[in-house]
Image: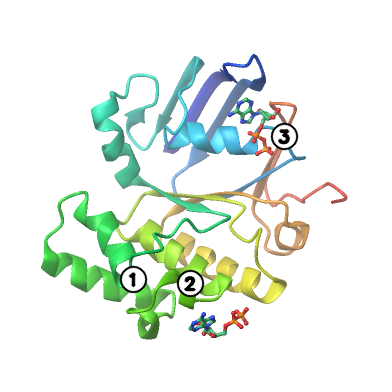
Amino acid sequence: MSIIKLSNVSKKYSNGTTALRNISLEIEAGEFTYIVGPSGAGKSTFIKLLYRELKIDRGSGTVAQYDLSKLRRRDIPLLRRSVGVVFQDYKLLSKKTVYENIAYAMEVIGKSPREIKKRVNEVLDLVGLKHKIRSFPNELSGGEQQRVAIARSIANAPKVLIADEPTGNLDPENSWEIMNLLEKINLQGTTILMATHNSQIVNTLKHRVIAIENGRIVRDQEEGVYGYDD
Ligand code: ADP
Ligand code: ADP
Protein backbone atom coordinates (compact mmCIF):
# COMPACT_ATOMS: atom_id res chain seq x y z
CA MET A 1 0.00 0.00 0.00
CA SER A 2 1.34 3.47 -0.90
CA ILE A 3 1.46 5.81 2.03
CA ILE A 4 2.66 8.66 -0.19
CA LYS A 5 1.51 9.02 -3.78
CA LEU A 6 2.12 11.99 -6.04
CA SER A 7 0.89 12.23 -9.63
CA ASN A 8 2.21 14.89 -11.99
CA VAL A 9 2.78 17.39 -9.22
CA SER A 10 4.14 20.82 -10.10
CA LYS A 11 4.89 23.79 -7.89
CA LYS A 12 5.59 27.34 -8.93
CA TYR A 13 6.38 30.11 -6.44
CA SER A 14 4.61 33.45 -6.76
CA ASN A 15 7.79 35.08 -8.11
CA GLY A 16 7.60 32.76 -11.10
CA THR A 17 10.22 30.16 -10.08
CA THR A 18 9.08 26.65 -10.98
CA ALA A 19 10.47 24.52 -8.14
CA LEU A 20 8.92 21.16 -9.09
CA ARG A 21 7.85 19.85 -12.48
CA ASN A 22 5.66 16.84 -13.06
CA ILE A 23 6.70 14.83 -10.03
CA SER A 24 5.16 11.35 -9.81
CA LEU A 25 6.14 8.78 -7.22
CA GLU A 26 4.84 6.22 -4.80
CA ILE A 27 6.30 5.33 -1.43
CA GLU A 28 5.16 2.20 0.34
CA ALA A 29 4.34 2.11 4.04
CA GLY A 30 7.47 1.22 5.99
CA GLU A 31 10.01 2.36 3.39
CA PHE A 32 13.09 4.46 4.18
CA THR A 33 13.82 6.86 1.32
CA TYR A 34 16.55 9.46 0.83
CA ILE A 35 15.90 12.55 -1.29
CA VAL A 36 19.14 13.87 -2.80
CA GLY A 37 20.10 16.52 -5.32
CA PRO A 38 22.03 19.78 -5.67
CA SER A 39 21.11 22.95 -3.77
CA GLY A 40 18.05 24.56 -5.28
CA ALA A 41 16.91 21.30 -6.91
CA GLY A 42 13.52 21.35 -5.16
CA LYS A 43 14.03 18.99 -2.20
CA SER A 44 12.66 21.34 0.47
CA THR A 45 9.75 22.35 -1.72
CA PHE A 46 8.92 18.68 -2.23
CA ILE A 47 9.00 18.05 1.51
CA LYS A 48 6.89 21.11 2.29
CA LEU A 49 4.17 19.90 -0.07
CA LEU A 50 3.94 16.63 1.85
CA TYR A 51 3.02 18.22 5.16
CA ARG A 52 1.00 20.96 3.50
CA GLU A 53 3.32 23.80 4.40
CA LEU A 54 2.89 24.56 0.67
CA LYS A 55 0.00 23.78 -1.64
CA ILE A 56 0.33 21.71 -4.80
CA ASP A 57 -0.67 23.84 -7.76
CA ARG A 58 -0.89 21.14 -10.43
CA GLY A 59 -1.34 17.39 -10.18
CA SER A 60 -2.50 15.45 -7.15
CA GLY A 61 -1.08 13.85 -4.04
CA THR A 62 -2.05 11.81 -1.03
CA VAL A 63 -0.16 11.36 2.23
CA ALA A 64 -1.50 8.78 4.66
CA GLN A 65 -5.21 8.98 3.77
CA TYR A 66 -5.18 12.72 3.09
CA ASP A 67 -5.68 14.25 -0.34
CA LEU A 68 -3.26 17.19 -0.43
CA SER A 69 -5.32 19.20 -2.92
CA LYS A 70 -8.64 18.70 -1.16
CA LEU A 71 -7.45 19.09 2.43
CA ARG A 72 -9.25 22.03 4.06
CA ARG A 73 -7.28 24.47 6.14
CA ARG A 74 -8.98 23.31 9.34
CA ASP A 75 -8.04 19.71 8.58
CA ILE A 76 -4.32 20.37 8.21
CA PRO A 77 -3.76 19.40 11.88
CA LEU A 78 -5.16 15.95 11.05
CA LEU A 79 -2.49 15.51 8.38
CA ARG A 80 0.18 16.76 10.78
CA ARG A 81 -0.84 14.05 13.23
CA SER A 82 0.07 11.46 10.62
CA VAL A 83 3.26 13.20 9.52
CA GLY A 84 6.09 14.07 11.91
CA VAL A 85 8.67 16.58 10.70
CA VAL A 86 12.30 17.16 11.70
CA PHE A 87 14.40 20.11 10.49
CA GLN A 88 18.08 20.91 10.11
CA ASP A 89 17.82 23.66 12.74
CA TYR A 90 15.74 21.59 15.23
CA LYS A 91 13.07 24.30 15.70
CA LEU A 92 12.58 23.63 19.40
CA LEU A 93 10.69 26.24 21.42
CA SER A 94 13.45 28.02 23.33
CA LYS A 95 11.31 29.12 26.28
CA LYS A 96 9.96 25.63 26.91
CA THR A 97 11.76 22.74 28.57
CA VAL A 98 12.41 19.45 26.82
CA TYR A 99 9.32 18.03 28.53
CA GLU A 100 7.17 21.00 27.49
CA ASN A 101 8.41 20.95 23.89
CA ILE A 102 7.24 17.38 23.46
CA ALA A 103 4.11 17.73 25.59
CA TYR A 104 3.00 20.73 23.55
CA ALA A 105 2.81 18.67 20.37
CA MET A 106 0.40 16.34 22.18
CA GLU A 107 -1.61 19.04 23.94
CA VAL A 108 -2.57 20.67 20.65
CA ILE A 109 -4.28 17.48 19.56
CA GLY A 110 -6.10 17.09 22.86
CA LYS A 111 -4.24 14.28 24.60
CA SER A 112 -4.82 13.95 28.35
CA PRO A 113 -2.12 15.01 30.83
CA ARG A 114 -1.75 11.37 31.87
CA GLU A 115 -1.20 10.14 28.32
CA ILE A 116 1.18 13.02 27.68
CA LYS A 117 3.33 12.29 30.71
CA LYS A 118 3.59 8.62 29.83
CA ARG A 119 4.41 9.22 26.18
CA VAL A 120 6.95 12.02 26.81
CA ASN A 121 8.88 9.68 29.08
CA GLU A 122 8.63 6.89 26.51
CA VAL A 123 9.98 8.94 23.59
CA LEU A 124 12.74 10.52 25.70
CA ASP A 125 13.75 7.04 26.74
CA LEU A 126 13.92 6.01 23.08
CA VAL A 127 16.26 8.90 22.23
CA GLY A 128 18.29 8.42 25.43
CA LEU A 129 17.58 11.82 26.97
CA LYS A 130 15.33 11.18 29.94
CA HIS A 131 17.92 12.86 32.15
CA LYS A 132 17.48 16.11 30.17
CA ILE A 133 13.73 16.27 30.69
CA ARG A 134 13.91 19.57 32.63
CA SER A 135 16.58 21.22 30.46
CA PHE A 136 15.98 24.08 28.09
CA PRO A 137 17.10 23.75 24.44
CA ASN A 138 20.04 26.18 24.89
CA GLU A 139 21.40 23.89 27.61
CA LEU A 140 21.72 21.03 25.13
CA SER A 141 24.30 20.25 22.46
CA GLY A 142 23.19 20.26 18.82
CA GLY A 143 22.98 16.48 18.73
CA GLU A 144 20.87 16.46 21.87
CA GLN A 145 18.54 19.13 20.48
CA GLN A 146 18.01 17.08 17.35
CA ARG A 147 17.24 14.00 19.44
CA VAL A 148 14.62 16.01 21.34
CA ALA A 149 13.20 17.21 18.02
CA ILE A 150 12.95 13.59 16.87
CA ALA A 151 11.27 12.62 20.14
CA ARG A 152 8.76 15.42 19.59
CA SER A 153 8.17 14.41 15.98
CA ILE A 154 7.16 10.88 16.94
CA ALA A 155 5.22 11.73 20.10
CA ASN A 156 1.91 11.36 18.28
CA ALA A 157 3.02 8.11 16.61
CA PRO A 158 2.93 9.43 13.03
CA LYS A 159 2.80 7.02 10.09
CA VAL A 160 5.39 9.09 8.22
CA LEU A 161 8.46 10.91 9.49
CA ILE A 162 9.90 13.56 7.19
CA ALA A 163 13.37 14.90 7.87
CA ASP A 164 14.86 17.85 5.98
CA GLU A 165 18.67 17.68 6.33
CA PRO A 166 18.45 16.38 9.91
CA THR A 167 22.24 15.98 10.19
CA GLY A 168 23.09 19.21 8.35
CA ASN A 169 24.38 21.01 11.45
CA LEU A 170 25.98 18.02 13.18
CA ASP A 171 29.43 16.46 13.29
CA PRO A 172 29.82 12.89 11.97
CA GLU A 173 29.48 11.25 15.38
CA ASN A 174 26.24 13.03 16.21
CA SER A 175 25.00 12.50 12.66
CA TRP A 176 25.40 8.76 13.02
CA GLU A 177 23.61 8.85 16.32
CA ILE A 178 20.68 10.56 14.61
CA MET A 179 20.74 7.94 11.84
CA ASN A 180 20.69 5.12 14.38
CA LEU A 181 17.56 6.66 15.85
CA LEU A 182 15.85 7.11 12.49
CA GLU A 183 16.74 3.52 11.64
CA LYS A 184 15.22 2.32 14.91
CA ILE A 185 12.04 4.34 14.31
CA ASN A 186 11.82 2.93 10.77
CA LEU A 187 12.19 -0.62 12.08
CA GLN A 188 9.23 0.04 14.37
CA GLY A 189 7.15 0.61 11.22
CA THR A 190 7.32 4.36 10.55
CA THR A 191 7.88 5.39 6.93
CA ILE A 192 10.87 7.71 6.66
CA LEU A 193 11.66 10.29 4.03
CA MET A 194 14.90 12.17 4.48
CA ALA A 195 16.40 14.95 2.34
CA THR A 196 20.16 14.95 2.77
CA HIS A 197 23.53 16.13 1.45
CA ASN A 198 25.38 13.57 3.52
CA SER A 199 26.99 11.25 0.96
CA GLN A 200 28.69 9.14 3.64
CA ILE A 201 25.38 8.28 5.21
CA VAL A 202 23.56 7.59 1.93
CA ASN A 203 26.40 5.41 0.63
CA THR A 204 26.78 3.47 3.88
CA LEU A 205 23.29 3.05 5.29
CA LYS A 206 21.69 1.86 2.06
CA HIS A 207 18.10 2.72 1.25
CA ARG A 208 16.01 3.86 -1.68
CA VAL A 209 17.42 7.03 -3.25
CA ILE A 210 15.34 9.52 -5.21
CA ALA A 211 17.39 12.27 -6.89
CA ILE A 212 15.81 15.58 -7.83
CA GLU A 213 17.50 18.02 -10.21
CA ASN A 214 15.98 21.18 -11.53
CA GLY A 215 12.57 20.24 -10.11
CA ARG A 216 12.44 16.81 -11.78
CA ILE A 217 13.04 13.27 -10.53
CA VAL A 218 16.13 12.13 -12.41
CA ARG A 219 16.85 8.88 -10.55
CA ASP A 220 15.00 6.44 -8.30
CA GLN A 221 17.09 3.51 -7.06
CA GLU A 222 16.57 0.76 -4.51
CA GLU A 223 19.66 0.63 -2.25
CA GLY A 224 20.92 3.64 -4.16
CA VAL A 225 24.01 5.82 -3.93
CA TYR A 226 24.42 9.53 -3.26
CA GLY A 227 25.86 10.20 -6.70
CA TYR A 228 27.19 13.77 -6.35
CA ASP A 229 30.66 15.11 -5.50
CA ASP A 230 29.67 17.57 -2.75
P1 ADP B 1 16.53 22.47 -2.30
O1 ADP B 1 15.81 22.15 -1.03
O2 ADP B 1 16.77 21.28 -3.16
O3 ADP B 1 17.78 23.27 -2.08
P2 ADP B 1 14.30 24.29 -2.76
O4 ADP B 1 13.08 23.47 -2.80
O5 ADP B 1 14.61 25.08 -1.54
O6 ADP B 1 15.57 23.40 -3.19
O7 ADP B 1 14.26 25.32 -3.97
C1 ADP B 1 13.85 24.95 -5.30
C2 ADP B 1 13.78 26.22 -6.16
O8 ADP B 1 12.74 27.07 -5.68
C3 ADP B 1 15.05 27.06 -6.13
O9 ADP B 1 15.20 27.64 -7.39
C4 ADP B 1 14.74 28.10 -5.07
O10 ADP B 1 15.48 29.27 -5.32
C5 ADP B 1 13.26 28.32 -5.28
N1 ADP B 1 12.56 28.73 -4.07
C6 ADP B 1 12.57 28.09 -2.86
N2 ADP B 1 11.76 28.72 -1.98
C7 ADP B 1 11.24 29.78 -2.64
C8 ADP B 1 10.33 30.84 -2.29
N3 ADP B 1 9.79 30.90 -1.06
N4 ADP B 1 10.02 31.75 -3.22
C9 ADP B 1 10.55 31.69 -4.45
N5 ADP B 1 11.40 30.72 -4.86
C10 ADP B 1 11.74 29.78 -3.97
P1 ADP C 1 28.78 17.87 21.90
O1 ADP C 1 30.00 17.10 22.28
O2 ADP C 1 27.63 16.99 21.52
O3 ADP C 1 29.00 19.00 20.95
P2 ADP C 1 28.65 19.86 24.00
O4 ADP C 1 30.12 19.95 24.22
O5 ADP C 1 27.94 21.01 23.36
O6 ADP C 1 28.24 18.51 23.26
O7 ADP C 1 27.93 19.58 25.38
C1 ADP C 1 28.33 18.53 26.20
C2 ADP C 1 27.36 18.43 27.37
O8 ADP C 1 27.25 19.67 28.06
C3 ADP C 1 25.95 18.08 26.89
O9 ADP C 1 25.45 17.04 27.71
C4 ADP C 1 25.14 19.33 27.09
O10 ADP C 1 23.83 19.03 27.52
C5 ADP C 1 25.89 20.09 28.14
N1 ADP C 1 25.80 21.52 27.82
C6 ADP C 1 26.24 22.14 26.70
N2 ADP C 1 26.01 23.47 26.74
C7 ADP C 1 25.39 23.71 27.95
C8 ADP C 1 24.86 24.87 28.58
N3 ADP C 1 24.93 26.09 28.02
N4 ADP C 1 24.29 24.72 29.78
C9 ADP C 1 24.20 23.50 30.36
N5 ADP C 1 24.68 22.37 29.81
C10 ADP C 1 25.25 22.45 28.62
Label 3: few (<14), some (14–19) or many (≥20) C-alpha neighbours in 10 Å: few
Which is more toward the observer, 119 or 139? 139
**Would the CB of label 3 be found within 8 Å of ligand 1?**
yes
Question: Is residue 167 shown left or right of residue 86?
Answer: right
Marked residue nearer the N-terminal end (1 or 3): 3
**Would the CB of label 2 be found within 8 Å of ligand 2?**
yes
Secondary structure state at the residue bearing disc 2? helix
Secondary structure state at the residue bearing disc 3? loop
Residue highlighted by disc 3: 40
Measured as percent of width and height from the top left, residue 218 is found at 75, 31
Disc number placed over residue 97 in the picture, else none: 1
User: Of discs 3 and 2, which sits in the foreground?
Assistant: 2
User: Of discs 1 and 3, which sits in the foreground?
Assistant: 1
Instruction: Tell me which residue sits at (63%, 61%) in the image.
Output: 167
Q: What's the amino acid at mark 2? A: Asn
Q: What's the amino acid at mark 1? A: Thr
- The residues bearing labels 1 and 3 have C-alpha atoms spaced at a distance of 34 Å
Question: Is residue 78 shown left or right of residue 56?
Answer: left
Which is more toward the observer, 65 or 13? 13
Disc number placed over residue 167 in the picture, else none: none
Label 2: few (<14), some (14–19) or many (≥20) C-alpha neighbours in 10 Å: few
Quarter, ligand 2: bottom right
Compared with residue 181, is residue 88 higher up or lower down, i.e. above or below?
above
Marked residue nearer the N-terminal end (1 or 2): 1
- Quarter location, residue 102: bottom left
Residue highlighted by disc 2: 138
Measured as percent of width and height from the top left, residue 89 is found at 56, 56
Instruction: Tell me which residue sits at (20%, 73%) in the image.
Output: 118
Question: Is residue 178 shown left or right of residue 53?
Answer: right
